[in-house]
Amino acid sequence: MTIPARGFRDEEFATRTALAQARMAAAGMVGILLSTEAEVRYFSGFHTLFWQSPTRPWFLFVPVEGKPIAIIPDIGADLMRRTWIDDIRTWGAPAPADDGISLLVDLLHGYAARGDTIGVMKGHETQLRMPLGEYERLLAELDGMHVADATEIIRSLRMVKSAAEIEKLSHICAIGSRTFAQVSQFAQEGQPLEEVFRAFRRAALAQGADDVPYLVGGADAGGYHDVISPPTSRPLACGDVLMMDTGAVWDGYYCDFDRNWAIGHGDDASRRAYDVLWRATEAGIAAAHPGATCRDLFNAMHRVIAELDDQGGDVGRLGHGLGMQLTEWPSHCNWDETEIVENMVLTLEPSLSYGAGRIMVHEENIVVRENGAVLLTQRAAPELPVI
Amino acid sequence: MTIPARGFRDEEFATRTALAQARMAAAGMVGILLSTEAEVRYFSGFHTLFWQSPTRPWFLFVPVEGKPIAIIPDIGADLMRRTWIDDIRTWGAPAPADDGISLLVDLLHGYAARGDTIGVMKGHETQLRMPLGEYERLLAELDGMHVADATEIIRSLRMVKSAAEIEKLSHICAIGSRTFAQVSQFAQEGQPLEEVFRAFRRAALAQGADDVPYLVGGADAGGYHDVISPPTSRPLACGDVLMMDTGAVWDGYYCDFDRNWAIGHGDDASRRAYDVLWRATEAGIAAAHPGATCRDLFNAMHRVIAELDDQGGDVGRLGHGLGMQLTEWPSHCNWDETEIVENMVLTLEPSLSYGAGRIMVHEENIVVRENGAVLLTQRAAPELPVI
């Protein structure tokens, strides 16, 4: 196993920035103001878990020309200086009276005076990671400035991964696969589900994951009932179907896939559901080639799922993008006409409802290459495995 | 070791809701619309890691009378039905054309027609966990509705913990303390820092943590340079000062404290910095009694820190609230006049800069009782420990 290098070369950030700038120029924007972890990291390389503290806002302004400018709390200055960013403006945060707002006004007031347009992330799957009241105050102080939605610019860039990003994603998917391969060693009848989860996390760390921030699943007689629960202390019992779905990370990049097992023996309905979902995943893999759309992927998987369930359960989509976040654009949905292009990293996540309120989900991770999908995960067994 | 019960009794959510409703009524609000994980969980008990996916917005409306109402994606319906919430309205998300907005308009249009005021979280340390464009669209569709900032109502409730919350916090702090006590067994000269971090996470899980989402720190010759970095692969070397700062969780509640060690031997400057911070923490513990303010705590710690550094480093505050989030209101700062009351759970986190760009941080977690602070963490050694 070769471990990739951590971080990225400065050239990668320069390329990302140049691509964004070309799209900004075409859209008539003088810059994009970012406040969210993934976007700030994407253009700067600033990588810290400190975002988990909601106290302080962080900003990166990507102008239409030149390097991005960081407007951040003092506590991040040392780490930001180790990135490719030169212009770092800091304040002593937290400071409710002025948490970066006057620094932003200094930076942007010239644009406002000229009636220029800046971009912010306002679209689907985005959030505003600063107090809403402060955002309103900023706009009020920048009277005359136009604000446009920059989501499409950022989305179109982030959906297509670089070689270095794919290397990291491939590495964490391999770690996830090796961890799932060990589950039969630590998940046994009688063991409380929360202990199984704890053992899974420890195994993933031993395999080289930096962390396992996301781990959900379920286990119940003849099938589980939802797919987002934390584990209970209920012991695994013969006849259970167990599912674990993990988002493990390495150097800030996620895998996101699951596996299913029967404990002791699998009932017919669960084995049939498993078979349908395994074949739906195959159909998704076959459909994931450049030029297809997310809708095509949805339809390819849905046609198989419909053998058992024409509703498709409550999950709402049959997979999504994957990268710096557990889930990213696009969505394998009937409404998503995003074209699949080379070097997208995607999950294929068919699900169905069966029996009385049971649900089953399969998930694999792929990278799209010139000739079609290449699995990043070790393919799940074709029949429901029994522990 | 007694492990507390997971979750809360319905009465706890009823009490939280009633207290919020009394404050809403006094503020002239007909309800509060929430979109963030901690707030939705606080009033509903809805607990899932699925919030890590940014794709879907989730809403809880707490009306001035009656139980909260959940407006959530289908995928969360099964889990929400297991809480005390009765009125659960769902939609098939993701759905960019209407991700819950028409359900919110249905719920709120009567208030808008009457020109009522609803609260949303707009203040310090808050975020908007839905697309900004969707929020703007919602307001446009609810013409006539007034929006007020509900931060103070939620903040004043969440800052003071219940007996059941304190039990969970005490449990995770004990797990953190037992884990830190093992560090000398797995952190040795020559070991890459990232391996030390991985071993720490595994040890914390073995001690009973559900997860260790936050783990930062540093190690460098004669002292570390920042306190929010991910670990490097640099091996620990004789003369290093090592710091690890962890936010481990149990049942959705955090500990947040750190420990420092010298590898091989500690240099004089670092031992002196350690002594000052240890005594600053003592001063914070002594000052943390009901009736004092956060400013008092700040001043008590700052007076000791000033023996070495009258700036106090880049951290920006000397501790904060602790609970469902790694950091919560209030802040031990000169500007924070929040009165300390019984059953607040707080961190005391004095820091200082010394030497050439080195920084040191100490942190303990306390609960404030009638007669003053009670430590939830096992107190750090009074002198810089050597591994």
Image: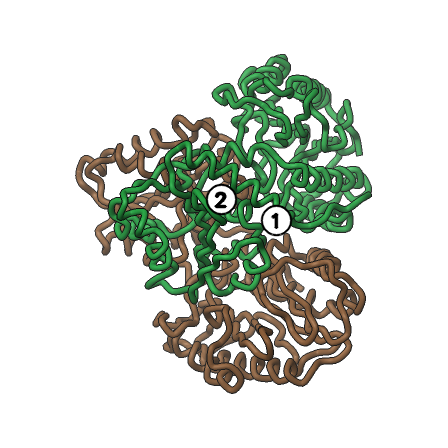
Chain colours: A brown, B green
- The answer to whether tags 1 and 2 share a subunit is no
Where residue A7 sits: x, y (%)? 53, 51
Residue furthest left as drawn: A114
The answer to whether B264 appears left or right of B370 in the picture is right
| Chain ID, mark 2 | A
- Identify which residue, B143 or B22, lies in the foreground: B22
Where residue A256 sits: x, y (%)? 56, 64
Q: Nearer the viewer, mark 1 or mark 2?
A: 1
What residue lies at 48% left-to-right and 57% top-to-bottom? B87
Q: CA distance from mark 1 to mark 2?
A: 42 Å
The answer to whether B315 appears left or right of B3 in the picture is left
Q: Which residue is mark 1?
A: B10
Q: Amino acid at mark 1?
A: Asp
Count up the numbered dots: 2
Q: Amino acid at mark 2?
A: Phe
**Few, some or many residues within 10 Å of mark 1 (<14, 14–19, 20+):** few
What residue lies at 60% left-to-right and 74% top-to-bottom? A358
SS for dot 1: helix
Q: Quadrant of residue B322?
A: top right
Vertical order, B104 against A303 (above or below): above
What residue lies at 46% left-to-right and 69% top-to-bottom? A316
Vertical order, A306 against A114 (above or below): below
Where residue A73 sits: x, y (%)? 46, 32
The answer to whether A298 appears left or right of B196 in the picture is left
- Identify which residue, A319 or B58, lies in the foreground: B58
Q: Which residue is mark 2?
A: A46
Vertical order, B335 against B192 (above or below): above
